[in-house]
Image: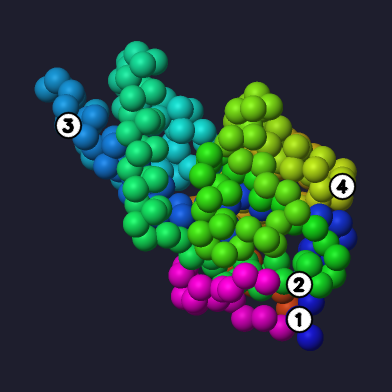
Amino acid sequence: MTVRAPALRAVRAVVLDTDGVVTDSAAVHAAAWKEAFDAFLAAGPPGDPARRRPFDPGEDYLRYVDGRSRLDGAASFLASRGLRVPPEEVERVAAEKERLFTRRLREGGVAAYPGTVRLLRVLRRDGVPAAAASASRHAREVLASAGVLEWFGAVVDGVEAARLRLPGKPDPALFLEAARRLGVPPGRCAVVEDALPGVEAGRRGGFGLVVGVDRTAGPGTGEALRRAGAGLVVRDLAELLTGTPAAGGAGAEREARP
């Protein structure tokens, strides 16, 4: 029988980030950011070659963009290149990323990670509610596209964050709102995140368990998640189950709705 691993047995609810945790949409976000940033950098005046180096969808995405709102992510990356960009230009880059991501999402859709869906099934069977919390305004659409929206008792996305004026990660407000909607105090909830700002938000919010998801398994990424506040780091959420092998990889299979 598939059961929750010991680390999860004490929690009464689980709050999961969306991109890179529930769905393989982080790659779609990274590709859209690369196209938007590279076009902006290439159009700038000649100068320091380092400032015009193309956006790295791996390292730059994880360090400056992942887990942040669009505006915060755009500003963070451009500042990392030493660029003083007016707010209206930052907004223009963020809006172009939004357009590119929406087009890619509607052309190809996204898949849910099989290991995550297995965990969601066990949580539902055990009466443990789950919420999705994401800075992305597309989180609900992404979850619906992947066929997993119905697994969540609450969804707090970028649209809700803007409506409620919730600050972005690493502030824990997004996760705290998700826990509030589930009716479970943070100390009895687990947060599952793949982004460093999100892991830090879980720690700062006083959540009972913060799980870092290291799908890249790159050099030092797992340790970086631990330093940010993850009490446990896994490569796939199937590792949080006993009797269930870890899934082979992103998009290995598309799970059906419950």
Q: How many residues crowd around disc 3 within 10 Å: few (fewer than 14), some, or many (20 or more)?
A: few
Q: Secondary structure at mark 2?
A: helix
Q: Secondary structure at mark 4?
A: loop
Query: Which marked residue is nearer to the observer: mark 4 or mark 3?
Result: 4
Residue 128, quarter of picture: bottom right
The Cα–Cα distance between marks 3 and 2, rounded to whole angstroms, is: 48 Å
Q: Earlier in the sequence, mark 3 or mark 1?
A: 1
Compared across the picture, whether 90 is left or right of 54 comes to: right
Residue 16: numbered disc = none
Q: Are marks 3 and 1 in contact (CB under 8 Å)?
A: no
Q: Earlier in the sequence, mark 4 or mark 3?
A: 3
Name the residue that disc number 3 marks: 42
Query: Which marked residue is nearer to the observer: mark 1 or mark 4?
Result: 4
The Cα–Cα distance between marks 4 and 3, rounded to whole angstroms, is: 48 Å
In this rendered view, identify the residue nearer to me: 230 or 180.
180
Residue range corresponding to the magenta coloring: 243-258
Residue 2: numbered disc = 1
Name the residue that disc number 4 marks: 184
Q: Secondary structure at mark 1?
A: loop
